[in-house]
């Protein structure tokens, strides 16, 4: 389902289901992150739902807290983003120790066309969410980096929430992927 007009990059609060028909496969990225084959196949078969709470704290700092569930209510990864561009350590239940940071940025400030050139004009007005993550090689033994931008695009004539990923694997493999989400309603 297309994103309703009242949902914007300034407030992503709600439930979002990954649309596998419109999204690129993430299997290659997961493989390069060291996720075992069986887990990748289970993830590929599951319906992935994001439960997003988007808010500002008492100090005015923007946060996006995401709880991920898979088919049947199985808990996935949590993504708790603080949009202040501060590097933070995290243990990801799927691919181990990572370091990451997030911010709001005007797409024109980004250098990679894949991350900035496809969004609707509203994203230029309010900025995209830019999320960077890298493996913590000292703890995980693997090396990869991921830059993501989040926003809204016209996908087959409908306004959709998307994430664009610019990924580099351990041997320099470069992948560009897009994930597309259906709006599934408010948080309950």
Image: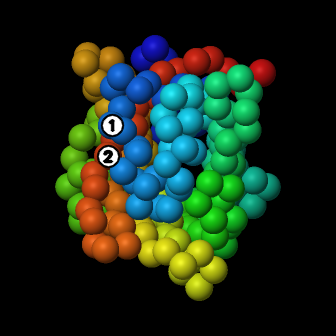
Residue placed most toward the observer, 102 or 127: 102
User: Which of the 4 quarters of the picture holds residue 26?
Assistant: top left
In the picture, which quadrant includes the C terminus?
top right
Residue at 68% x, 67% y is 90
Residue at 59% x, 75% y is 140
- Residue 177 disc label: 2
- Mark 1 surroundings: few (<14), some (14-19) or many (≥20) residues within 10 A: some
How many numbered marks, from 0 up? 2
Q: Residue furthest front?
A: 38
Residue placed most toward the observer, 7 or 131: 131
Residue 5: percent from left, percent from top: 46, 20
Residue placed most toward the observer, 151 or 27: 27
- Residue 65 disc label: none
- According to the picture, the residue beneath numbered tag 1 turns out to be 24
Would you say the residues marked 1 and 2 are in contact, meaning their CB atoms lie under 8 Å apart? yes
Q: How is the image coloured?
A: rainbow
- Mark 2 surroundings: few (<14), some (14-19) or many (≥20) residues within 10 A: some
In 3D space, how far apart are the residues under numbered discs 1 and 2 (Cα atoms)?
6 Å
Residue at 73% x, 38% y is 75
Compared to residue 182, the image places residue 130 above or below, namely below
Q: Is residue 105 left or right of residue 12?
A: left
Residue 49: percent from left, percent from top: 60, 30
Classify mark 1: helix, strand or loop.
loop
Classify mark 2: helix, strand or loop.
strand
Q: Residue furthest bottom?
A: 138
Residue placed most toward the observer, 175 or 182: 175
Q: Is residue 6 visible?
A: no
Q: Is residue 17 visible?
A: yes
Residue 117: percent from left, percent from top: 22, 47
Compared to residue 50, the image places residue 126 above or below, namely below
């Amino acid at each position: 389902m297309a994103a309703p007009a009242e949902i914007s990059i300034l407030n992503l609060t709600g439930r979002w289901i990954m649309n596998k028909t419109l999204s690129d496969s993430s299997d290659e990225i997961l493989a390069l992150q060291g996720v075992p084959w069986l887990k990748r196949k289970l993830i590929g078969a599951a319906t992935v739902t994001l439960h997003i709470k988007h808010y500002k704290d008492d100090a005015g700092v923007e946060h996006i807290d995401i709880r991920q569930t898979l088919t049947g209510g199985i808990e996935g990864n949590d993504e708790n983003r603080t949009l202040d561009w501060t590097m933070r350590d995290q243990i990801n239940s799927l691919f181990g120790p990572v370091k990451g940071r997030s911010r709001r940025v005007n797409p024109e400030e980004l250098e990679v066309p894949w991350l900035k050139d496809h969004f609707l004009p509203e994203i230029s007005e309010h900025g995209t969410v830019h999320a960077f993550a890298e493996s913590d090689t000292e703890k995980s033994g693997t090396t990869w980096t991921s830059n993501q931008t989040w926003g809204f695009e016209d996908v087959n004539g409908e306004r959709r929430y998307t994430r664009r990923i610019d990924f580099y694997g351990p041997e320099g493999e470069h992948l560009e992927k897009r994930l597309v989400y259906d709006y599934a309603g408010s948080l309950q």
